[in-house]
Image (cartoon, grey):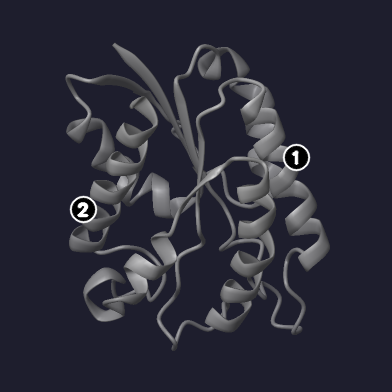
Amino acid sequence: MKKVALLGDSIRLFGYGKVVPKLLKRKAEVFQPKENCKFAKNLMRMIFDFKEDLKDCDVIHFNCGLWDVADLLGDGKLFSTDEEYLENVLRIAAALKRITPHVIFATTTPVHPEYPFNKNSDIDRFNALVVPKLTALDVKINDLNALVAEDIEGNICDDKIHLTELGARRCADQVVRMIENEWV
């Protein structure tokens, strides 16, 4: 049986992370923290905390960004600068690549345009910064941003940031396809 890890923020925790283990039930043991990995630097810390759980993973799928790109204090400044986000995600990817060559990064999902703490233009900029650098490291890209953006109303729930049940299922299906492609 394969071993898979899912690391990420609440899009994973309350979204696709609830569905993926069911879809991979007879194919893989799925590890994921019970906690929200939140922003990139926190995810880095969690890699340290869960190093034993990550050992021997065949595939590691991770996401982060919604916290990093948030204007949490309403002062017009994002939680992480572009440079901090890029550096932290690249460090995460390098650490995960030391565990397995099969690492997948999920792009940061969009929010409903009315969500007050994130702007899709900032999310798009962060994704555009990190994707080419990760691709150069042979990290596979799971474009959950494009998937969720296809149907914001159907994929994003009333809180304007998290996934609906349908959105979680759509994302989980794509996550599983990406993971299974790494087994070939």
| Residue found farthest to the bottom | 114
Mark 2: few, some, or many residues within 10 Å (few <14, many ≥20)?
Answer: many
Residue 112 x/y as whole percent: 40, 81
N-terminal of the two: label 2 or label 1? 1
Give above or below for 70 relative to 136: below
Q: Secondary structure at mark 1?
A: helix
Question: What residue is disc 2 on?
Answer: 169
The residue at the point 41 percent across, 54 percent down is 11
Query: Tag 2's secondary structure?
Result: helix
Q: Where is the C terminus found, in terms of image quarters? A: top left
Q: Depth check: give the residue in front, 13 or 155.
A: 155
Question: Residue 154's image quarter?
Answer: bottom left
Q: Pinpoint residue 53: horizontal percent, then vertical percent.
A: 51, 16
Residue 110 % position (x, y): 45, 72
Distance CA(mark 2)–CA(mark 1)? 29 Å
The crowding category of the residue bearing disc 1, from other C-alpha atoms within 10 Å (few below 14, some 14 to 19, many at least 20), is: some
Q: Is residue 25 left or right of residue 65?
A: left
Foreground of the two, 44 or 159: 44
- Looking at the image, is mark 2 or mark 1 nearer the viewer? 1
Q: Say which residue label 1 marks.
A: 91
Amino acid type at image mark 2: Arg
Q: Label 1 sits on what residue type?
A: Arg
Residue 35 left/right relative to 87: left
Q: The N terminus lies in which quarter of the figure? A: top left
